[in-house]
Amino acid sequence: MLDFFDVFLVQQLLNGLAQGLVYALIAIGFTLIFGVLNVVNFAHGEIYMLGAFAGLLAIQLLAPPAFAVLLLVAAAGLVLGVLLERVAFRPFRRFNDEASLKSKALREATLLSSLAISIITRELMQLYVGADMQSIPQAYLLMTPIQLGPLSIASGQVLIFVTALLMFLLLQWLLFRTRLGLSIRAVSNNRLGALHVGINVNHIIIATFAIGSLMGAVSGIVVGLYSGNIFPQMGFSPGIKAFVAMVMGGLDSIPGAVISAIVLGLCEALSTDFVSQGWSELISYGLLLITLLYFPRGLFGKKVERV
Amino acid sequence: MSETLLELKQLSLSYGGVHALEDISLRLPAGGITGLIGPNGAGKTSLFNVITGFSRPSRGEVHYAGQRIDGLPVPQIARQGIARTFQNLRVFPGMTVFDNVSIGALSQQRFGWRALWSRQQHSAQAVSAATWAALRRTGLDGLAFELAANLSYGKRKYLEIARALALQPGLLILDEPAAGLNDSETAALADFLGQLSQEGLSLLLVEHDLSLVKKICNHVLVLSSGRLLAEGSPEQVMRDPAVITSYLGSEEA
Amino acid sequence: MLLAVLWLLLGWLDASYLYRLASMALVFGLLAASANLITGVAGMMTLGHAAFYGVGAYTSALLSSQYQFSPWLTLPLAGVTAALLGGLTAWLTRRLVNVHFAVATLGIGQAVYVTLLNWVDFTRGPMGITDIAPLSTASPAINLGLVMLVFLLCYLVLERTVHSYYGNALRALREDEQCVAAMGLDPAKLKIQVMVLGCFIAGLAGALWAYSTRYVSPGDFRFSESITILAMVVIGGLGSLPGAIMGALLLTLLPELLRSLGDYRMLVVGSIMFGFIMFLPKGLIGEYSALRVFRSHLKALEQS
């Protein structure tokens, strides 16, 4: 049946899908945090980078089985998320009245503080480990090709597919089937209202950061295991792509962000047929501009500004 | 009936299958204070939003001073002479009282860009004159250089009205002006609104405080579930059996 | 006047390093002041200011080195190109919320950087453009004087804009867009205007940069430059024009004074920025106090 397709094209699409799912993994955490705080968390890309390094550290120190590495990184992500919230976000949440919640100045301060934290983290890592690529030990690399007829998929790509699917489903379960999820949705819908019905908003925000960062960190190590290289700047570009995906998806829609992220990945992979690697960066910004022009509320957005 | 200032013709507004307003037709005479009452969710704020251009009606027309204004952008409607305040007190908190009010004065067309671009203390006399006039009118001139965020709640209410007055509107729309004020503040506000009306300004206000409505309004509109239930003088309306069952009955029970 | 004293002092010292440093401080002063207009005063979070700066720099560099345009013609052209790009960005996001503007400027910033890097035929890619003619061939002192002149003109324009009634409208836009519309001013128009003016000045600053260093390369216009400019505004105090200039001075001179820092430059920028957001959110000179200084006669005049 595959004879009808251009095998090369299908291969490209598969690679693009894997890349898109990486963006999606980051975008999910990004969107989750934005939904609850209405603030862009610029340090999310750094959580992704630190997740990869935490994995490397675990491998170098303990050399555990691959599955344990993922668990360790997840735990590290959890801790990092809580820390990040404490340092860059909590100090600006002294007030819970309506005026401060709507205040643009406060939101800007939070955005800037996360931006500053992201720079500091990246630069510190660069000083500490150097700007060069660090390679993952051979034994842990997931680059074994798996042949599917004429197609070949790296085992790392399979891991990315599985992780993305699992995380997405787990998150949907968490959001729509558990008490914690209900509280998260309540806080992101209406923080004041949530406060009034007795939800501990602070705890929910911390939990959201923990969950979002956990996902960011795990995606960092998964990508690291697949690509074999990790470096302090690795969070920057995917972080921006995730931000773009979130905006394209409509700011508050996790499925929207996931679909947009996959679209970005596919378009980038396909564009390499026509333009060189360097230019393919432009594809996602082009898509962003088109979305802003034709779907100002995002592809799947529903948030409407009310008077 | 005197000259018509605002006229709504078969106005409807619906979003996502919900009918916020259905087939509302009415005429508002120039001058006087009109009160708009109705239970929660009756569509009072929706009606305000349609008149001021924040929402586009799904059907029907809005005419102001003889001109059709529905579908015009918000700023243009404001420049035609309809000023509004908001339900949840929206001043510019990070700016001084004077600067807040000057925003209202700015949009009057007769100030060229040279006046706008000059320093406050030099020319642009007209902007500052209009600003000071509005500040004096509301008794805020002593606080002109305070940050709006530092004002008390009651003062901020007046600031919002001052900003609207600086637009020199023909029609002033107030969304729950007395909400959150105590009895003496409400009484002072009633006197103030009465004075504004005597000076020739037409007012349209949403208010929950029915005694205030009885006291100052000479015309009352009753909305219920997006429909115009009754209109007339306060006494007339409050005797209307349909109004009593749908609204007053439940309030006073 | 301060500038004249500085100019004489530098002329007396006659050190080309100091000339370079002074023009760098002036260029970043303009960048910070224009970013302050957009982000501090009008509240539109720009994350790609370096793009407009870069577009200006490359416009003037290419026009003067490839097409032998006179520097004095390329200065306004650089401004206009950057202003067009800025106006387009604002037009795209004119009815959207602040996050959309932030992501659009971030995207424009990256897109410009990628283009400068990859369009090798036109921009010479990562090698950059060398041998740009100076503003005038007279002497470095005259050149610095000319940079000062342009700086002064731009500063006066910005000063008027920020402290006029028009500036009030921009501040109101930052505080509450819907309210501004209800007061009869068109927020979309204001956003486009402010981006056009701010980016025009950023483009001019880019041209001045190209003429004073006589070399431009994509690396000067990366995301980290945009963040440095933003940090200058934050340090000086969002919305405060003298603050933005102070912030620019601090962040250009400090790394130079602490030369041993080397690689630590961005770390210093990030840490200072974080420190200010946490402990001195109003910046060195807060907006309110800056406005009070500039409008001190207002009280006396109006109340008499």
Image: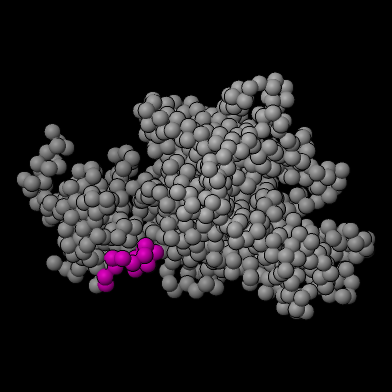
Give percent across and percent down for residue A156: 60, 36
| Closest to the observer, C275 or A41 | A41
x and y percentages locating residue A74 in the rendered image: 58, 27
- Residue occupying image coordinates x 22% and y 62%: B59
Q: Which residue is drawn at 65% across and 39% down?
A: A227
Considering only vertical position in the picture, is A137 above or below C12?
above
Image vertical order of residue A66 relative to residue C178, above or below: above
Instruction: Give the image quarter of residue C72.
Output: bottom right
The magenta segment: B67-81
Query: Does the image show residue A212?
Result: no
Viewer-proximal residue, C206 or C278?
A: C206
The location of residue A123, given as percent across then percent down, is: 73, 40
- Relative to B149, is C31 on the left or the right? right
Left or right for A239, reference C31: left
Is C173 left, or right, of C83 in this rendering? left
Residue furthest left as drawn: B241
Residue A78 seen in this snapshot: yes
Whether residue B80 appears in magenta in the rendering, the answer is yes
State the image coordinates of residue B160 (x, y, percent, origin top left).
40, 52
Residue B206 belongs to the span the image colors magenta: no
| Vertical arrangement, residue C70 with respect to residue A136, above or below | below
Residue that appears at 58% across and 57% down: A271
